[in-house]
Image (spheres, helix red, strand yellow):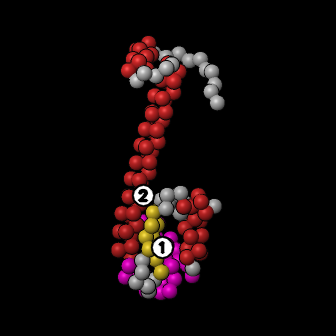
Amino acid sequence: MKVRKSFTIDKELLRELSEFRWRSRIESLSEALERVLRLGLDSLKSMQEIEEDEKVLEQRRVNNEAYARIEGELDRYKGKYVIIALGRLIGAADSFGEAVEILRRKAPEAKHAIVKRVGREEEVEREWPGLLERLK
């Protein structure tokens, strides 16, 4: 659905938009403006995703450092799931589901976490963008 709006625009910007319209063989100035806005908004969205990825990478680094620091002390949690987020041990749980609940409660802003069952060789480390939102 299209909506008619009126706005003011810088004269030079209008000239550039008109030039873009003709070079791109776009039928109307309105369509040209819509295309430029869509490209700009998509670009902004990509930049936000890159920033989000950088946050995940930084949290991964901090969590891995925390895990390496406390790994020798985890024997007392044998058979339990330990949760490391935001660079620290935030809890231990009897089940994976309980571990997720602890993560949701104690670190809702976490973009990366390590959940490991102590005493098992298998280790799972995942990035779950939006995981906590989906579990709510």
Instruction: Work out how far the residue at label 1 is from the one at label 2, CA to CA, in angstroms.
Output: 16 Å
How many marks can you see? 2
* Badge 1 or badge 2: first in the primary sequence: 2
Residue 50 can be seen in this image: yes
**Is 125 located above or below residue 9 in the figure?**
below
In this orientation, which residue lies closer to the viewer: 89 or 19?
19
In this orientation, which residue lies closer to the viewer: 91 or 23?
23
Residue 93 forms part of the magenta stretch: yes
**Is 84 located above or below residue 94 in the figure?**
above
Q: Quadrant of the N terminus?
A: top right
Q: Which mark is residue 12?
A: none
Characterize the local packing of mark 1: few (<14), some (14-19) or many (20 or more) Cα atoms within 10 angstroms.
Answer: many
Residue at 55 percent of width and 76 percent of height: 96
Percent coordinates x, y for residue 112 in the rendering: 45, 63
In this orientation, which residue lies closer to the viewer: 38 or 128?
38
Q: Which residue is mark 2?
A: 56
Residue at 53 percent of width and 21 percent of height: 30
Characterize the local packing of mark 2: few (<14), some (14-19) or many (20 or more) Cα atoms within 10 angstroms.
Answer: some
Percent coordinates x, y for residue 57 in the rendering: 38, 58
- Name the amino acid, label 2: Val
Residue at 49 percent of width and 20 percent of height: 27
- Secondary structure beneath dot 1 equals strand
Q: Which span of residues is magenta-colored?
A: 71-94
**Is 98 located above or below residue 58 in the figure?**
below
Residue 88 can be seen in this image: no
Q: Which residue is mark 1?
A: 115
